[in-house]
Amino acid sequence: MVDIHIHTSFSPDAVGKMENYILKAIELGMKTIGFSEHINLDLEYYKMLEGNTDIEAYFQEILRLKKVYGDKIKILFGGEVGFDKKIEKQAEELIAKYPFDYIINSIHLVSGEDAWLMPFYKDRTKKEAYDLYLDNVYESLCANYEFNTVGHIGYVIRRAPYDDISMTIREFGDKLDKIFKKVIELDVAIEINTKASKTLRFLPTVEILERYFELGGRKITYGSDSHDTNRLLDGYEEVKNFLLAHGITETLSFENGKEIYNKI
Ligand SMILES: [Zn+2]
Ligand SMILES: [Zn+2]
Protein backbone atom coordinates (compact mmCIF):
# COMPACT_ATOMS: atom_id res chain seq x y z
CA MET A 1 0.00 0.00 0.00
CA VAL A 2 1.77 3.07 -1.27
CA ASP A 3 0.01 6.42 -1.39
CA ILE A 4 2.08 9.13 -3.06
CA HIS A 5 -0.41 11.96 -3.43
CA ILE A 6 -0.76 13.56 -0.01
CA HIS A 7 -1.06 17.16 1.11
CA THR A 8 -0.28 18.26 4.64
CA SER A 9 -0.68 21.60 6.40
CA PHE A 10 2.31 22.83 4.38
CA SER A 11 -0.07 23.06 1.43
CA PRO A 12 -2.28 26.14 1.69
CA ASP A 13 -5.49 24.17 1.26
CA ALA A 14 -4.72 21.17 3.51
CA VAL A 15 -4.88 20.62 7.27
CA GLY A 16 -3.38 17.22 8.15
CA LYS A 17 -0.10 17.35 10.09
CA MET A 18 2.70 15.44 8.40
CA GLU A 19 3.66 13.61 11.57
CA ASN A 20 0.06 12.46 12.10
CA TYR A 21 -0.03 11.04 8.57
CA ILE A 22 3.15 9.12 9.29
CA LEU A 23 1.82 7.73 12.56
CA LYS A 24 -1.38 6.66 10.83
CA ALA A 25 0.55 5.11 7.94
CA ILE A 26 2.68 3.07 10.35
CA GLU A 27 -0.47 1.98 12.15
CA LEU A 28 -2.00 0.88 8.83
CA GLY A 29 1.11 -1.14 8.03
CA MET A 30 2.31 1.04 5.15
CA LYS A 31 5.98 0.72 4.27
CA THR A 32 6.16 3.88 2.16
CA ILE A 33 4.38 7.22 2.28
CA GLY A 34 4.82 9.98 -0.29
CA PHE A 35 4.07 13.63 0.36
CA SER A 36 3.24 15.89 -2.56
CA GLU A 37 2.68 19.45 -1.42
CA HIS A 38 1.32 21.94 -3.90
CA ILE A 39 3.85 23.76 -6.02
CA ASN A 40 1.66 26.48 -7.46
CA LEU A 41 3.90 29.24 -8.67
CA ASP A 42 1.47 31.48 -10.46
CA LEU A 43 1.80 34.16 -7.82
CA GLU A 44 -0.49 36.57 -9.54
CA TYR A 45 -3.23 34.05 -9.09
CA TYR A 46 -2.38 32.05 -6.00
CA LYS A 47 -0.88 34.61 -3.69
CA MET A 48 -4.05 36.58 -3.46
CA LEU A 49 -6.04 33.39 -3.07
CA GLU A 50 -4.35 31.23 -0.49
CA GLY A 51 -0.60 31.68 -0.48
CA ASN A 52 1.95 29.06 -1.39
CA THR A 53 3.71 26.10 0.13
CA ASP A 54 6.86 27.07 2.01
CA ILE A 55 9.04 24.50 0.28
CA GLU A 56 12.04 25.03 2.54
CA ALA A 57 9.98 24.44 5.70
CA TYR A 58 8.36 21.41 4.04
CA PHE A 59 11.76 19.96 3.15
CA GLN A 60 13.12 20.54 6.67
CA GLU A 61 10.15 18.74 8.22
CA ILE A 62 10.69 15.79 5.87
CA LEU A 63 14.32 15.60 7.03
CA ARG A 64 13.31 15.81 10.67
CA LEU A 65 10.65 13.11 10.39
CA LYS A 66 12.94 10.83 8.39
CA LYS A 67 15.29 10.90 11.38
CA VAL A 68 12.49 10.06 13.80
CA TYR A 69 10.56 7.45 11.77
CA GLY A 70 12.99 6.41 9.05
CA ASP A 71 13.48 2.94 10.50
CA LYS A 72 9.74 2.27 10.48
CA ILE A 73 8.60 3.73 7.17
CA LYS A 74 10.06 5.17 3.98
CA ILE A 75 9.13 8.84 3.68
CA LEU A 76 9.18 10.34 0.20
CA PHE A 77 9.63 14.01 -0.61
CA GLY A 78 7.43 14.79 -3.59
CA GLY A 79 5.65 17.76 -5.08
CA GLU A 80 2.56 18.39 -7.14
CA VAL A 81 3.31 21.06 -9.70
CA GLY A 82 0.29 22.89 -11.01
CA PHE A 83 1.44 23.32 -14.58
CA ASP A 84 0.97 26.70 -16.13
CA LYS A 85 2.93 27.92 -19.14
CA LYS A 86 3.69 31.18 -17.33
CA ILE A 87 5.53 29.55 -14.43
CA GLU A 88 7.27 26.75 -16.27
CA LYS A 89 10.70 28.32 -15.85
CA GLN A 90 10.20 28.97 -12.13
CA ALA A 91 8.99 25.42 -11.62
CA GLU A 92 12.07 24.11 -13.38
CA GLU A 93 14.34 26.17 -11.10
CA LEU A 94 12.54 25.16 -7.93
CA ILE A 95 12.58 21.47 -8.84
CA ALA A 96 16.31 21.70 -9.52
CA LYS A 97 16.91 23.37 -6.15
CA TYR A 98 15.47 20.60 -3.97
CA PRO A 99 16.09 16.83 -3.99
CA PHE A 100 12.52 15.83 -4.79
CA ASP A 101 11.89 12.11 -4.99
CA TYR A 102 9.17 12.68 -7.56
CA ILE A 103 6.96 15.26 -9.20
CA ILE A 104 3.28 14.90 -9.99
CA ASN A 105 2.43 17.12 -12.94
CA SER A 106 -1.14 18.36 -12.68
CA ILE A 107 -3.47 20.84 -14.28
CA HIS A 108 -5.49 23.06 -11.94
CA LEU A 109 -5.40 26.27 -13.94
CA VAL A 110 -6.62 25.87 -17.50
CA SER A 111 -5.07 28.55 -19.68
CA GLY A 112 -4.84 30.69 -16.54
CA GLU A 113 -8.38 30.06 -15.32
CA ASP A 114 -9.12 28.01 -12.21
CA ALA A 115 -11.03 24.89 -13.20
CA TRP A 116 -12.04 24.39 -9.55
CA LEU A 117 -14.26 27.45 -9.75
CA MET A 118 -17.54 27.87 -11.58
CA PRO A 119 -16.69 30.86 -13.79
CA PHE A 120 -14.49 28.54 -15.84
CA TYR A 121 -17.56 26.53 -16.87
CA LYS A 122 -20.11 29.31 -17.02
CA ASP A 123 -19.73 30.47 -20.59
CA ARG A 124 -18.43 27.20 -21.99
CA THR A 125 -20.16 24.10 -23.19
CA LYS A 126 -18.87 20.83 -21.81
CA LYS A 127 -17.12 20.19 -25.11
CA GLU A 128 -15.35 23.55 -24.98
CA ALA A 129 -14.33 23.27 -21.32
CA TYR A 130 -13.09 19.68 -21.58
CA ASP A 131 -11.29 20.24 -24.89
CA LEU A 132 -9.46 23.22 -23.44
CA TYR A 133 -8.58 21.26 -20.32
CA LEU A 134 -7.25 18.31 -22.33
CA ASP A 135 -5.20 20.64 -24.54
CA ASN A 136 -3.65 22.03 -21.35
CA VAL A 137 -2.89 18.52 -20.09
CA TYR A 138 -1.08 17.80 -23.34
CA GLU A 139 0.84 21.07 -23.06
CA SER A 140 1.85 20.14 -19.50
CA LEU A 141 3.44 16.95 -20.82
CA CYS A 142 5.77 19.10 -22.87
CA ALA A 143 6.95 21.02 -19.78
CA ASN A 144 10.67 21.68 -19.62
CA TYR A 145 10.94 20.24 -16.10
CA GLU A 146 11.00 16.53 -15.38
CA PHE A 147 8.06 14.81 -13.78
CA ASN A 148 7.20 11.23 -12.91
CA THR A 149 3.44 10.93 -13.05
CA VAL A 150 0.50 12.86 -14.45
CA GLY A 151 -2.03 13.93 -11.83
CA HIS A 152 -5.77 13.30 -11.93
CA ILE A 153 -6.44 13.23 -15.68
CA GLY A 154 -10.06 14.28 -16.05
CA TYR A 155 -9.89 16.80 -13.18
CA VAL A 156 -12.64 18.97 -14.71
CA ILE A 157 -15.16 16.15 -14.25
CA ARG A 158 -14.90 16.68 -10.47
CA ARG A 159 -16.38 20.12 -10.71
CA ALA A 160 -18.26 20.40 -13.99
CA PRO A 161 -21.81 21.69 -13.46
CA TYR A 162 -23.30 20.08 -16.58
CA ASP A 163 -26.17 17.59 -16.51
CA ASP A 164 -24.00 15.04 -18.23
CA ILE A 165 -20.45 15.34 -16.91
CA SER A 166 -19.02 12.28 -18.65
CA MET A 167 -15.76 12.53 -20.58
CA THR A 168 -16.30 9.70 -23.04
CA ILE A 169 -13.81 8.17 -25.42
CA ARG A 170 -16.35 8.69 -28.19
CA GLU A 171 -16.27 12.45 -27.64
CA PHE A 172 -12.74 13.02 -26.34
CA GLY A 173 -10.83 9.97 -27.52
CA ASP A 174 -8.63 11.87 -29.98
CA LYS A 175 -7.29 14.21 -27.34
CA LEU A 176 -6.93 11.46 -24.74
CA ASP A 177 -5.07 9.26 -27.21
CA LYS A 178 -2.67 12.09 -27.95
CA ILE A 179 -2.06 12.51 -24.20
CA PHE A 180 -1.53 8.79 -23.59
CA LYS A 181 0.77 8.35 -26.56
CA LYS A 182 2.91 11.18 -25.19
CA VAL A 183 2.83 9.70 -21.66
CA ILE A 184 4.01 6.36 -23.01
CA GLU A 185 6.67 8.00 -25.17
CA LEU A 186 7.96 9.96 -22.15
CA ASP A 187 7.88 6.72 -20.14
CA VAL A 188 6.14 8.36 -17.20
CA ALA A 189 3.16 7.12 -15.19
CA ILE A 190 -0.37 8.33 -14.84
CA GLU A 191 -2.07 8.56 -11.51
CA ILE A 192 -5.26 6.98 -10.27
CA ASN A 193 -6.61 9.60 -7.91
CA THR A 194 -9.40 8.71 -5.51
CA LYS A 195 -10.38 12.26 -4.60
CA ALA A 196 -13.14 12.18 -7.15
CA SER A 197 -16.73 13.22 -6.49
CA LYS A 198 -19.93 11.64 -5.23
CA THR A 199 -20.55 9.94 -8.54
CA LEU A 200 -16.97 9.05 -9.42
CA ARG A 201 -14.88 6.37 -7.77
CA PHE A 202 -11.62 7.71 -9.11
CA LEU A 203 -9.94 9.67 -11.86
CA PRO A 204 -9.29 8.97 -14.66
CA THR A 205 -12.57 7.16 -15.17
CA VAL A 206 -12.65 3.44 -15.93
CA GLU A 207 -13.27 3.94 -19.65
CA ILE A 208 -10.34 6.36 -19.93
CA LEU A 209 -8.01 4.08 -17.96
CA GLU A 210 -8.96 1.15 -20.15
CA ARG A 211 -8.03 3.21 -23.20
CA TYR A 212 -4.61 3.90 -21.62
CA PHE A 213 -4.09 0.16 -21.15
CA GLU A 214 -5.26 -0.53 -24.69
CA LEU A 215 -2.62 1.84 -26.03
CA GLY A 216 0.04 -0.03 -24.04
CA GLY A 217 0.21 2.15 -20.92
CA ARG A 218 1.12 0.19 -17.81
CA LYS A 219 2.65 2.66 -15.38
CA ILE A 220 0.27 3.67 -12.64
CA THR A 221 0.69 5.58 -9.41
CA TYR A 222 -1.98 5.61 -6.73
CA GLY A 223 -2.88 8.75 -4.80
CA SER A 224 -5.63 9.53 -2.33
CA ASP A 225 -4.97 13.26 -2.78
CA SER A 226 -5.60 13.54 0.96
CA HIS A 227 -5.84 16.98 2.46
CA ASP A 228 -6.44 15.54 5.93
CA THR A 229 -5.27 12.34 7.60
CA ASN A 230 -8.67 10.65 7.51
CA ARG A 231 -8.43 10.14 3.74
CA LEU A 232 -5.06 8.40 3.73
CA LEU A 233 -5.36 5.32 1.44
CA ASP A 234 -8.95 6.26 0.65
CA GLY A 235 -10.33 4.04 -2.13
CA TYR A 236 -7.16 1.97 -2.25
CA GLU A 237 -9.00 -1.37 -2.23
CA GLU A 238 -11.17 -0.35 -5.16
CA VAL A 239 -8.17 0.80 -7.15
CA LYS A 240 -6.34 -2.39 -6.29
CA ASN A 241 -9.25 -4.55 -7.45
CA PHE A 242 -9.61 -2.53 -10.63
CA LEU A 243 -5.91 -2.85 -11.43
CA LEU A 244 -5.74 -6.57 -10.68
CA ALA A 245 -8.76 -7.14 -12.93
CA HIS A 246 -6.77 -5.44 -15.70
CA GLY A 247 -3.62 -7.42 -15.16
CA ILE A 248 -1.70 -4.67 -13.37
CA THR A 249 -0.06 -6.01 -10.23
CA GLU A 250 2.19 -3.13 -9.22
CA THR A 251 1.99 0.61 -8.66
CA LEU A 252 4.94 2.93 -8.87
CA SER A 253 6.62 5.16 -6.38
CA PHE A 254 9.89 7.02 -6.85
CA GLU A 255 13.07 7.60 -4.91
CA ASN A 256 15.30 10.32 -6.26
CA GLY A 257 13.30 10.02 -9.46
CA LYS A 258 14.06 6.32 -9.74
CA GLU A 259 11.09 4.02 -10.28
CA ILE A 260 10.18 1.62 -7.49
CA TYR A 261 7.60 -1.05 -8.23
CA ASN A 262 5.30 -1.93 -5.34
CA LYS A 263 3.25 -5.13 -5.41
CA ILE A 264 -0.38 -4.27 -4.78
ZN1 LIG B 1 -4.23 18.36 -7.89
ZN1 LIG C 1 -3.27 17.21 -4.96
Image: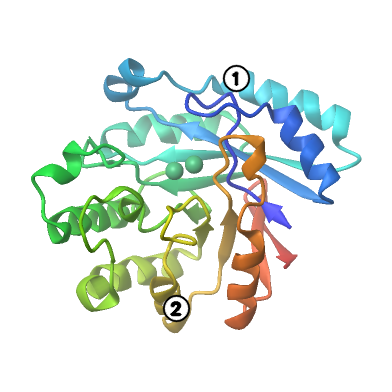
Q: Which mark is residue 210?
A: 2
**Please, is residue 202 above or below residue 82 in the view?**
below
**Is 135 on the left or on the right of 41, as rendered?**
left
Query: In the picture, residue 8 is in which quadrant?
Result: top right
**What residue sits 39% from the left and 20% below the top?**
50
Residue under the image location 26 percent in, 33 percent down: 86
Is 218 situated left or right of 151 in this image?
right
Q: Position of residue 30 (x, y in %)?
A: 80, 51
Q: Secondary structure at mark 1?
A: helix
Say whether residue 224 is left or right of residue 130: right
Coordinates of residue 196 in the picture (x, y in percent): 45, 53
Q: Amino acid at mark 1?
A: Glu
The answer to whether the residues at label 1 and label 2 have Cβ atoms under 8 Å apart is no
Label 1 or label 2, whichever lies nearer to me, is 2
The CA span between labels 1 and 2 is 39 Å
User: Could you tell me which secondary element the residue under label 2 belongs to?
Assistant: helix
Residue 256, compared with residue 99, is above or below; it is below
Locate the N terminus by quadrant: bottom right
Q: Quadrant of residue 166?
A: bottom left
Image quadrant in which the C terminus is located: bottom right
**Label placed on residue 254:** none
Does residue 201 appear anywhere in the picture?
Answer: yes
Quadrant containing ligand 1 reads top left
**Residue at 31% over, 73% down:** 177
Q: Look at the numbered disc 1 and say if its residue's Cβ is closer than 8 Å to ligand 2.
A: no
Q: Which mark is residue 56?
A: 1
Could you tell me how many numbered marks the image carries?
A: 2
Residue type beneath disc 2: Glu
Q: Position of residue 133 (x, y in %)?
A: 25, 53
